[in-house]
Every structure is written in structure tokens, then in C-alpha cells.
Image (cartoon, rainbow, N blue to C red):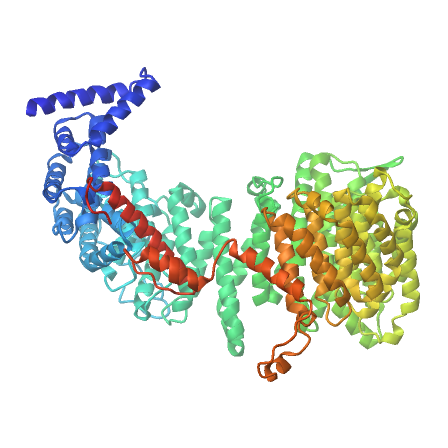
Amino acid sequence: MPASEEASLRALESLMTEFFHSCTTNDRKREIEELLNSFAGQPGSWRHCLYFLSNSRNEYVMMYSLTVFENLVNKMWVGVASEDKAELRSCLPKLLLSQHALLPFFIRNKLCKVIVDIGRQDWPMFYHDFFSNTLQLVQSPSLAPLGLVLLKMTSEELVCPREDLSVVRKEELKKLLLDQIPTVLNLLTGILETVWDKHSVTATTPPPSPTSRESGELLSTSVIPTSVLAGDSTPMVLEAESGALCLLALECLAHLFSWIPLSSSITPALLASIFHFARFGCGGHGRTGQMVGHAERAKLGVMAMNCINELMCKNCVPVDFEEFLLRMFQQTFYLLQRLTNTHSHTNTHTIKSRLQELDESYVEKFTDFLRLFVSVHLRRIESNAQFPLVEFLALLFKYTFNQPSHEGYLACLDICSIFLDYLTTKIRSRLADSDSVVNRYKDALVLLLREVLNRIQFRLNQSQLEELDDETLDDDKQTEWQRYLRQSLEVVARVMELLPSQTFSDLFPVLQEDLDIYLGLQQFIVRSGASRRLNITAEADCRKLHCALRDLSSLLQAVGRLAEFFTGDVFTTRFNDALAIVQRLVEVSCYGSQICLYDVEMAVPSVLKPDLIDVHAQSLAALQAYSHWLAQFCGEVQRQQDQTQFMDLITSSMAATTPLINAKVPEKLLLSACHLLVSMATTVRPVFLVSLPAVQNIFNLITENHNHRLPPEAHVLVCRALSNMLLLPWPSLPEAEQQWPNRSANHARLLSSLTHQYRLLPRPPNHHHNTVIQQTLCVLRDLVDSISGEATKSRQICYHSLQESVQVTLALFPLFIQQPDVTDEMLSFFLTLFQALRVQMGVAFTEQIIQTFLSMFTRDQLAVSILQEGSSGSKVVQKFLKILQVVVQEPGQTFKPLLPSILSLCLDQVYPIVAERSCPDVKAEMFELLFQILHQNWRFFFKSSVLSSVQRSGAEELMENQAQFIAAMQVSTAHSAQFSTTFLAFIAIFVSEFTSCFCVFHPSQDLPSFSQGVYRIVNDLRFYRLCNGSLPPGTLKL
């Protein structure tokens, strides 16, 4: 036998070497693979593999042998004889103990995995000493690393097993491991403490109490000297063997903490030990040679932070864990002090350069920890008298503003935002003492505000900010620079809510400084004939101007973001500040529109021209942000009968806006002007707006000058603004003073001009007219949609002006039924009409529209459209069904005569087409239509009321339109039956029969419980199929 096994071993080594040789063909590899698989499938092959594993140093052979064992344990264990299992449980651990030092680490780990897999199957019933053996190895000085590898694998494989175990067994294993956790944590604590005590160069002094200056000592700790803060208490000499042992222990703890609950087993001693090693990431280069170097020390720090973060992410914290959290804060405070300590070990490093030297993963983990601490646990202990939040914030902000990377800075800024949200919520819930709360944190908040404002300014950070990409859009349609700026401005806005006066006084002077540069550019413009040139050419001056313009653009966005804090209840108290801002914005906007800097020749136009355009656009956008303040101002001045100041603001704003509404203006600037015009017309609504000469010029541009048509988006916005000026009621004025007759006549003239080409289209039009149709309907749809929620009078005037265009559209519709792109635009227009103006349209015309649609959407036409799933044709049918949904939901008897035709369309034409096809979008709209018919129009089928039906004492009620009702119900029932049966019947019949033999299924009707039950079924089904597949032939199967 030995000779035979020796020969088999040599043959296997030869085969494995041949298989992995570069010259071996794929056909030969397949042959070898078939031979190996055939051998592995033979009964008793594991005995040969045990010999191979014990007597070969060929890595391929050892890995193959272990794969055979792994397959045996995980897939065939149920069918293995009891005595063979006992032999494997005995031989493999002995093999591991005798050869672990000689085996490559991946072979050793694979062998450990096989042993743990056996434990997962047999512990504790048949493998009672599995876990106790592992713990003994952990306690052995020479074998502790091996024990820790086994311990971590045990946590991984027994707590999160695959589907090769039943649910009951999984739950049993987790409970068994939980019972062992106190012992395990105690052993791991001992390992970490022993290494730390052995290798510490100086006597370890406890971390300082962050409250020592105010509230005495925290948890009986003492203040440590500055020299210790510099890092002297961290072991600078750590043997490589001890470092590797601690790394394994921390890896075990990290996985254990991922699933065990917080309990008294997580002792202060363990927590202190973990934080000891977390300091390894805080800097200080260890000696090389046989000692742990910088990279290895960083790994220890990263793994320790992993452990801490696993604890911190647990939101379910027992009440008695306040002391635990306080200890966590104590250690956090100390680590923050180390990371941000200016008295570094070199005395020449800045905080930023020190953070840059640290392992990137460590900084990320520490930032994650701070986020978890602030977002999850701050609310639990902030009220504790020993919790020095102000000092903590100072360190957090120092850590934030010294981040070496933009991503790190934004991650920390997000933590600051979380804290500001928490503080704002707290103040809102404690209005009585809100001032005292704010004053407590005022200094920290002012520091945060000023630093954030500094970090977005190019004149202070040009080299760093130029690194940010301002071209590529992310998934949120913003560039890297825009995301950076937006996140920064959100912090400014949150501080503004807490400290409005301070924020305004800090922001406005910085804004003014850049404004002075921008407003002073006019003196550098030199005329040469018809051209103008900006006479700033020196490189340093151009760079300074570039930075000032970028900063001005950012600060204008900041000013716009703060607009909401000047309206509502604080309008009066903050009026002067807001007025100063708006006047300045109007001045800047007028200046930009007057000198047209975008049209001036300049040095480095590729840089400065986009800067100038952006500043001009942002000044208009910031002014638009104050439209709600202007609307409130408008209401106030009308009551006070003194509109001079308000009129000056609006007149100047329009003087700045209207010259930019021109096709020759850069599109970014044009759109900003259009949006401002819309806000003035829609939100502010001054009575005199439409009579301003600047606004009259826009009316003339749109209605008369068709040769200089604006880009489509701008054209739609301007038309909306002009229409709303005439349609929307003026605020704070009685109905008699609204001048509706005059405004109605002007609106009719406006719409007549806008639709002139459209209404005069030849019949039939040719395909060259499609653009006119689509552009006109796009404008009209936008006009209707913008007044859909307004008063009846506005909608009446709008429909009166639109009436002829609506009739033209209805006449054109049959001519374009074969052109889905045009039909889609027409139906979109009609859908908006029905949603907003169906009452104004009247019953007769509405019925005419619906009848026209019904006659055009024949079964053949519907089939052509629907079968092009996802195409314009399919969208046309969806829009048509949406229109019908609006019609059938109208209360009263107005549109009830249309119900038979609508039901016929659904049941006789649409449903037969979609019944046998997927068509999910069309089906969804069709069933929504059926539902609305049955829900909103039940008296179409049952004439009597519910009360009279109940009082009828059992007499049968006559149903009207019975055939259509039954057909609708049959369609709905058939659709439901395609994907489900009654829920309770499903449980009672299928599940009970299917699961009765092997698991318990609780017939819960709530989705989470039902999903859990299904998971148990599927898991156990896989498990029993695996078991049946491993049983010998003729065995009774499960």
C-alpha cells in the first residue's frame, strides 16, 4: 500500500506539473481535469489525499488534495460514514499542528478552512472539542497566530454560512458562538495588552481628560504631558512577530464586532487596548530591521480603526452604555489631539503635511469614525456635563481644514453639516433657551464659516482649486468643482440659519472686495474704432483678475443661497440687510449688461471670457433667488402706498435683463436672463411690470421680429413670462382693479402672434412644417401648464386666447396619425389642456375631441402603435389613455355619455392587443383607466346609493351596463391571475404542501415576515437537495 500510494503521489505530481506548464494544450488540460475529477469522485479518495498532503511539498498537489477535502465536507458530508468522519476530525488538526510552520500561508489557510468547515457541520455534538482546541491554540505563545487564524475563520464561516446548512442549524451556531464571546474577547484583550505592555518604551499614561479644564476628570483619567501628546506613549519598538500577532487579533475583533451585540463583554480594557493600536496610524516612523516598519504600523492602525468603526456603527445601544460611549469619546479626543497637534515630533511639519504622510486608508477610517460618532451617537451623550463638545468641535474643524485631499475635505465637511443639522434641530426644540445654546457654539461656528469661505476662494487656494474638474459631469449632472462649491455653500447656509448677522457681516465684505475689482474693469476698456479691448495683459494681472472673477461667481452663488433667510417672519427685522444685497445685485447686473464684457477683446480669452460670462450670469441668478423677497416687498409697499424704492429695483432689474434676451448673447447668460424674467412675472408680479419700456421691447421682439428667433429653451421661457404677466392676478389687489378686459385682449394678441404660422399651415401640411407644429405646441403646452393651478379667471382668459389653436390642432390630428413624433406632441398638448382647462373647454368640445381620438385610434392603428414597444407610437397610446383617465375622473355627469365608448376602447380594442404581449407601459395605463372608471363612476353600473342598497333587505339590485361591468372585471381578474393567486390560498395550499416535510412556515401576511419565511424555505430546499445529492445509492433521501 505505501508503495502504491507513493507511486500515485508521483503520478499526481507529474500530472499537476504538466497541467500548469505553459506548453500544455487546452485539450490535454481537459483530459487531466477529467482524470482528477474522476479520482476525486471515487469513494475513499480522501484517504489518498491525506497521504498526498502529508508527504508532498508540491503546492499544486497540496491544493488539489485540500480541494477534495473541501468538496467532501461541504457537499458530501451527510453520506460519509461516521468512522471516516471521526478519522478526519482527528487527522487534519494533527496534520495542521505538525506542519503549519512549513506550509505556504495559502495552503495553511486552506487547511484551516477545511477544519472549520468540519466544525460547522459537527460542533458540538460530534466535534465537541473543536472550539476549545481553537481557544487553547490562541492561549499558546508559540501557536497563537495559528489559533487566531482559526478563530477568525470560525467567526466568518459559522456566523455567515452559505446555503449548505439548514436555517435551524445556522441559528444554533450563532447562539453557540455568542455563548463563547466573553471568553474569546477576554483572550484577545490579553494578547493586545501583553504586547503593548511588553513593547512600550515609556510607561503608558492614560489619555488626557478633555474636560480637565472645565469639569474635572473624565472617568478617573489624568491629564498627560505635552511630550506624551507628541506620541511618546506609543511603542516605537515593536517586533515584527508581535506586530503580526496583534494584526491577527485585531482582524478577529473586527469581524466579531460586525455581528455581536454591544454588551458588558466589550470591556473598558479591551476598548483601551484597541485605541492603543489605533495610535499607530497617527504618525511616527518605527525602526526597520526586525522591527515593525511604517507600513506595518499603519496596517495596525487601520485595523484598529476598523474595530472601532464596527462598534460605532451599531445604532442599537443599551441605556447603560453611556459610560462606554464616554470612553469612546475620551479616546477619540486623544487621537484627534495627536493628529492635529502642532507640536509634532519634528516641530517643522504642518498638520496638513503630517496628515499627508499618514496612510491614506487610516485617514479614511478615522474620518468614517468621526462621521459615525457625530451622526449616530452625539445625540446620546451631548447633554452629558462631562462631554466637552466645544473643544471636540475645535479639533474636528482643525482636522477638517487640514485634510490633504479634496475628497477628504468634503467627507469632513459632510460631518460638519451633520453636526449643524443636529444643532439646528436641537435649537428648534428648545426655543426658550436657543440664544444660550447658540452662544455656546458661536466661536466654533464662526471659525467654521470663515474657513469654508476661505476654502472656496481662488485668491487664497488657486493651485488646489484649479485641480478640480469643471467640465466632466457626474451622475448628478454636476462637475467636481460644482459639487465642491455646492457642499461648501450648504455649510454656509446652515451657519446662516444659526448666526444670520455674523454670516452676513463675514460674507458681505469679501463679496465687496471682489465686486470692486469687477466694477472697476470699465476703466481698462480701450476703444479702437468699432471694437473694444480690455487693457489688462500682464500675466500676474490676468491671474489676479481670473481669481477675483471666479471668487465673485462663487460668492454671488453664496448670496443667492442665503435668500431664504430674509423672507417670512424675519422680513422686517432683516429688511435693511436684504435691501442692501438686492440693490448691490441690481447694480452689478446693470453694469454687466451695459458694458457687455462678454463682447470685449481681451488677453487669454479662453480663461477670462468664460469667467466674465459666469459672473454676469450668477449676478442675475442671485437676483432671481431674491424674487420671493421682492414679492413680499411688493405686498408691503402696496399697503404703505409708497412704491418708489420697489419700482426702482424692478425697473433697474428689467433694464439689466431685457438687453440680454437676444440670440447673439452667450446661451448661459441668455438663459439666466430668461429665468429672471420668468420669476419677476410669476413670483413678484408687479402691477407696472408689463408697462415698462424694457418689457414692451421683449413683447415686440417675440411678436414681431421672427427673423431673430431665440433658441428653443429661451423662447419657451420668454413666452411663459410674457403670458404670465397678463394672466396671473396681481397680489394684494381686489378683483375690480385687476384690469382683466385689457389684459385679456393683450393676451389674445400675444397668442395670435405666437401661433400665426401654425394657424395658417396648409392642409395637408408637408413634412417641412413638422418643426413649426412641434415648436408651437411646446410653447402652448408650457403656457397652459404654468397656469394650471391658478384662479379660474386666469384659466378662462388663457383658453379664450388658445381656442383657435386648439381647434387647428384637432383638425391637424387626423393628418398626422401615421407620424408618431408629431402625434405625441399633439397628445401631450391635449393632455395638459385636459388637466388644466377641461372645465373651460366645455362639454361639447371635449366630447368632440374624445370622439375624434376614438375614431382615429382604430384597432389596426392601435396595434401598429402598441407593437412598437418603447417607440413613439407606444408613447402616443399611453398619452391617449392618460387623457381618458382625466376625463373619467371628472365629477358629476358631465362626461358620463363618453363612458360606453371609452370602455369599448379598453375592452374591445386595447386589451386584445396587449393581453398576449408584455407591453408593460401600455398595460399600466389601461388598467389605471379601468380602475378609475370603476372607482369614480360606480353609479354608471349601480344607480342606487350604498345606504339604500343596505336598506333594501336582501332584495336584488338591478345592474345597468352589466355586460361591460362583467367584461371589465374579467379583464382585471385575468390580469391578476397571470402573476398571482389569492395570498392566503397560496399559503394554505402550495406552501403547506411543499414545506410540510422539512420546515415550518408561518402564514404571516406582512411582507417582511412572509419574505423571511420564503427565505427559510429556499435555504432549506437547497440544503436538502445538497444532502440528497451526497447520499450513497439506495439510501432513503430527505
Residue 947 shown left or right of residue 304 in the figure: right
What residue is shown at x 20% (from left), y 57% (from top)?
Answer: 176
- For the residue pair 947 and 999, the one nearer the viewer reads as 947
What residue is shown at x 23% (from left), y 28% (from top)?
Answer: 38
- Which quadrant would residue 640 be assigned to in this image? bottom right
- Which quadrant would residue 684 be assigned to in this image? bottom right
The spot of residue 821 in percent (x, y) is: 75, 43
What residue is shown at x 83% (from left), y 54% (from top)?
Answer: 719
Determine if residue 244 is in view. Answer: no
User: Is the N terminus in the top left, top right, bottom left or bottom right quadrant?
Assistant: top left
Residue 192 shown left or right of residue 314 in the figure: left
Count every numbered label the image shows and give the total: 0
The spot of residue 227 in percent (x, y) is: 30, 52
- For the residue pair 669 and 1016, the one nearer the viewer reads as 1016
What residue is shown at x 31% (from left), y 67% (from top)?
Answer: 321
In the image, residue 853 sits, relative to residue 117, either above or below, namely below
- For the residue pair 723 and 571, the one nearer the viewer reads as 723
The spot of residue 268 in percent (x, y) is: 25, 61
